[in-house]
Amino acid sequence: MENFEFRNPTRIVFGRGSENKVGAETAAHSKKVLLHFGGSSIKSSGLYDRVTDSLKAAGVEWVELGGVKPNPRLDLVHEGVRLCKEHKLGLILAVGGGSVIDSAKAIAMGAVIDGDVWEFYLGRGAPVDALPIGTVLTLPAAGSEASTGTVITKEEGWLKRAVNSDLLYPRFSILNPELAFTLPKFQVACGAVDISAHLMERYFTNVRNVAFTDRLIEATLKTIIRQAPLILKNSQDYDAWSEFMWAGTIAHNNLLNTGRIGDWASHDIEHEISGIYDVAHGAGLAVVFPAWMKHVLHHDLDRFVQWAVRVWNVELDVFNPEAVAREGIARMEAFFRSLGIGTTLAGLGIKDDRIDEMADKCTDGDTRTVGNFVTLDREAVRKILRLAE
Ligand code: NZQ
Ligand code: ZN
């Protein structure tokens, strides 16, 4: 195991009716905030009214900024930064899914600097301060409600880039599984794939003697595999949603990364797909992950066999480990398809004409590699995208 330091400071307020505590949670940090949200879902579900009632009751004033799109855009971040500065706001309250939370994190960094927050996304400098943020989660998927990450897209050039900083852990996140009842099946499926991907990015590591976190990751993955079909069958299944939502947060709050070094190449490659084609992140991952696995399989066949046997219940055959590993990948692909998600680029309507461009952008023109389990250069990324066709 690697040395590590771990502290996740995000306060989780979980359960039925927990959104009614948002006023008190917010007031503990600021009485004048930016209320940030996406499209129409929080208004049609009635959540907007419950959140604003709670803010009023706690004496919190707010300025609103809705309109966050999936794959959140830099232009709206700039607007949020402007509002925070103009009205001297003290916290950003994100009500929505990963895109709203990521946009809030970008605004939080931008509101305390004079320059353009995009510089951080280009890797030029690191934030030293940020406004606090709080969240009310409506879509268990990205894990941003308790993560250090934010991913933003700049439309000019369609560049999707991430920043990670401990400053971006939300101060609090409100998780009421009932808020997910209104999700379309497609978003549920994308969420299941994204959570699974966060687990597998951590699972495939070169660090030895990580048996405890291996087991935690396997258990979390099995939870998603068990609960996602129940939710698709009955969108109001509170118990299934509770397991799914909490597993989604744990999958990405860095606990399962302790003592290990994750891979993250599939995420880097996927961000080029959703950056250029504006597809849902989970849908992109369902395409990239199987192809990545087929490409790196022989790097550590034993690890793939362990994963296939323990997570996908493939029968162990010590004389034919490759067949065991490949059967694990096949079962994972079948699971994604059973949720209604395709596993090929063609299924996303993507032809090969921009594969070279994606491989080039992903590796900054072949000047950097991606991934840790196996490091990938531009040609390797291109091969993986070809395998995904
Ligand atoms: O905009 P509204 O109307 O709210 O609709 C949203 C949106 O269209 C809808 N939705 C959300 N909650 C709903 C709902 N519809 C009905 N009922 C509800 N309860 O769902 C759609 C998708 O929302 P979005 O926030 O885009 O999805 P998700 O949570 O999957 O976030 C994806 C983004 O997170 C990034 C991805 O790259 C992508 O940009 N990620 C962020 C990470 C992080 N910060 O740590 C890590 C992840 O790996 C990921 O990269
Ligand atoms: Zn993800």
Image (tube, helix red, strand yellow):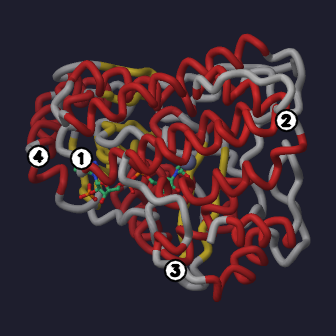
Q: Disc 4 or 2, which lies upstream in sequence?
A: 4
**Kind of residue at badge 1:** Leu
Ligand 1 lies under 8 Å from the Cβ of mark 1: yes
Q: Secondary structure at mark 3?
A: loop
For the residues labelled 2 and 1, the Cα–Cα distance comes to 38 Å
Asked whether, in this view, residue 267 is left or right of residue 71, the answer is right
Q: Which quarter of the image is occupied by the C terminus?
A: bottom right
Ligand 1 lies under 8 Å from the Cβ of mark 3: no
For the residues labelled 1 and 3, the Cα–Cα distance comes to 26 Å
Residue nearer the viewer, 252 or 310: 310
**Kind of residue at badge 3:** Glu
Q: Secondary structure at mark 4?
A: loop
Residue nearer the viewer, 313 or 373: 313
Ligand 2 lies under 8 Å from the Cβ of mark 2: no
- Disc 1: which residue: 183
Ligand 1 lies under 8 Å from the Cβ of mark 4: yes
**Kind of residue at badge 2:** Leu
Q: Position of residue 216 (x, y in %)?
A: 62, 16
Q: Position of residue 170 (x, y in %)?
A: 48, 35
For the residues labelled 1 and 4, the Cα–Cα distance comes to 10 Å
